[in-house]
Image (cartoon, rainbow, N blue to C red):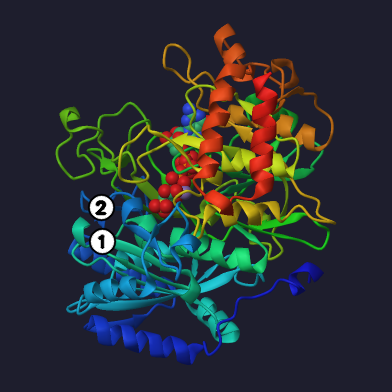
Amino acid sequence: MNAAIDVFKRNEFPGSSLAALNAWVAEVAALTQPDHIHWCDGSDAENALLTKQMLADGTLLPLNPETHPHSWLHRSSPSDVARVEHLTFVCTAQPDDAGPNNHWMAPAEAHAKMDALFAGCMRGRTLYVIPYCMGPIDSPLSRCGVEITDSPYVVANMRIMTRMGAPALARIEREGTFVKGLHSTGELDPDRRFIMHFPDELAIKSFGSGYGGNALLGKKCHALRIASHQARHEGWLAEHMLIVGIENPQGETHYIAAAFPSACGKTNLAMLIPPEGYRQAGWKVWTVGDDICWMRPGADGRLYAINPEAGFFGVAPGTSDSSNPNALATISHHTIFTNVAVTDEQEPWWEGLDTRTPALDWQGRKYDPANGPAAHPNSRFTVSAKQCPSYSAKAEDPQGVPISAIVFGGRRASLVPLVFEARDWTHGVLVGAAMGSETTAAATGAVGVMRRDPMAMKPFCGYNFADYFAHWLSFDRAGAKLPKIFHVNWFRKGGDGKFLWPGFGENLRVLEWMIQRVEGKADAVETPIGHLPRAEDLNLDGVALSDEAHDLLFGFDRAGWQAEFAGIGEYLQEFGARTPQALKDEQQRIAARLAH
Ligand code: GTP
Ligand code: SPV
Ligand code: MN
């Protein structure tokens, strides 16, 4: 047992045990009036029975059993296809504790509003009790929760995405603490849809949506919004990050955690396949997690990370044998597909998969390009991480993996170079806090709009960003051996509007430079925004880059960065006096350097 784990404080709430769980289930049943109550044990038999029921009532549709054994298609309500940030609230006693980065409602008002929606909502339905564990079942870093839902689709997804069932219930009984998540699909009416978080009560109430991030409460609601709040009080970090291991030809593995906003490349980087030359030389890539990372300092001062999830809820469009062969292999069986198209042969299909023309679109209509894409742009697959060929044996390690580098990145069509390195931790926190990215189809609303998305946590931080930045800064203390911090941009575009960097597997070239920097073996040029590699500092053998690509991917545009830093300064002002002075000082120091 790692000594550091003994000092890992827990946010106990007294009086909670299986008795508390039973009492809560009874209270919810009295409110929601279900016809039946089912306690999920997570067994194969239970899953088989639920699947049979869902196939019978059309919740799941069969896919081709020859090409996609044990795989199903779910078509959601067309108005319920993504996270709803405008309907997602953090309910703290004081609005300032939720911060300008969250929608806020007073807890009593939010409870009253939600309880009115939940009243009688499960009549004619079954109430499922899902005990789950986020993280390896025997890890001291893991945390448990219980989701109550009336959706068998949610049960089936939670079974893949978390360690669900009897072992989680046993841990809850042992620990006496769990996050309470109450969910109902209601009538799937967007006007009666809310996702409410009560961090001080370790509770979530979600009504009116069956979509992943709104309904699988272990994921964004628990593992990020509630967990970030707990992490702040207990001295750790709950982040929207992939975790990937890069093994060099000498057999040494560095673990990298990377925060990119939704639909900006986490799953792809986590499952990267090295370019041919790297493969031949013996490089290997190991997937630990693709969306969420919980990190805490270990006894040796390094940050140790676990992936709290057990599966991938990944973006389908763009996933192909050339972009992400590991993902394609992972989803070849035992997979739930949501809102993809299907071919004549009942195979799942999406834009970017191959050149076939699908038969039916995501709504089950005969495919007609006039209706838009065949697969919804936010169509997804749910699959066990164990099916991934690159799944790391270390992903199940209760101690987690030591992190050598933290990477921030967004979709930036202009200005931001391929990669740069922060000078130190404080600068790195500013780089994360200043992240910008174009919005994607993962949330409802306009796509392609540039917004600030600090640490890719804009939709997921369960408390005031100013306090979150202070929490990040607090890790720089005596004895800490912190990872280096980098920023990447795979999405820089040229004059023709096309991506300048080939991306995907080729991103390993950038990761290699980072690892060399960590080991003190690679060069870089010092600029006001950080250390930039020259093109020759990266291994670009076999990559054909135009002159324009060279200039823009490795260049530093002083005038552009002056404007960017003015914008970053204004953004930090939005958090007022709560913004840490060290962060404001860092922004001003760099702005001043950019000015001459
Ligand atoms: P969430 O699950 O929403 O958190 O998304 P994610 O960050 O895991 O994004 P994902 O890896 O699923 O990628 C989203 C989209 O970006 C897909 O359509 C990918 O094909 C595309 N993409 C991923 N990596 C790259 C890259 O290196 N270059 C380019 N051009 N596109 C990429
Ligand atoms: C994201 O939107 O960042 C996702 C999908 O990973 S969801 O689970 O809906 O949040
Ligand atoms: Mn995500």
Along the viewing direction, whichever of 148 and 443 lies nearer the viewer: 443
- Dot placed on the residue nearer the N-terminal end, 1 or 2: 2
The residue under the point 64% across, 61% down is 396
Q: Quadrant of the image for the N terminus?
A: bottom right
Can residue 407 be seen in this snapshot?
no
Q: Quadrant of the image for the C terminus?
A: top right
In the rendered image of this protein, does residue 326 appear above or below residue 462? Answer: above
The image quarter in which residue 308 lies: bottom right
Along the viewing direction, whichever of 495 and 545 lies nearer the viewer: 495
Res 80 label:
2
User: Disc 1 marks which residue?
Assistant: 193
- Please state which amino acid type lies under the numbered disc 1: Arg
Residue 64 placed where, x, y %?
A: 30, 47
The residue under the point 81% across, 51% down is 481
The image quarter in which residue 140 lies: bottom right
Is mark 1 in CB contact (under 8 Å) with mark 2?
Answer: yes
Query: Crowding near pointer 1: few (<14 within 10 Å), some, many (20+)?
Result: many
Res 524 label:
none
- Is 232 displayed left or right of 445 in the figure? right
Residue 225 placed where, x, y %?
A: 48, 61
- Mark 1 CB lies closer than 8 A to ligand 2: no
Q: CA distance from mark 1 to mark 2?
A: 10 Å
Q: Say which element carries label 1.
A: loop
- Please state which amino acid type lies under the numbered disc 2: Asp
The residue under the point 46% across, 67% down is 94
In the rendered image of this protein, does residue 443 appear above or below residue 6? Answer: above
The residue under the point 19% across, 58% down is 191
Q: Say which element carries label 2.
A: loop
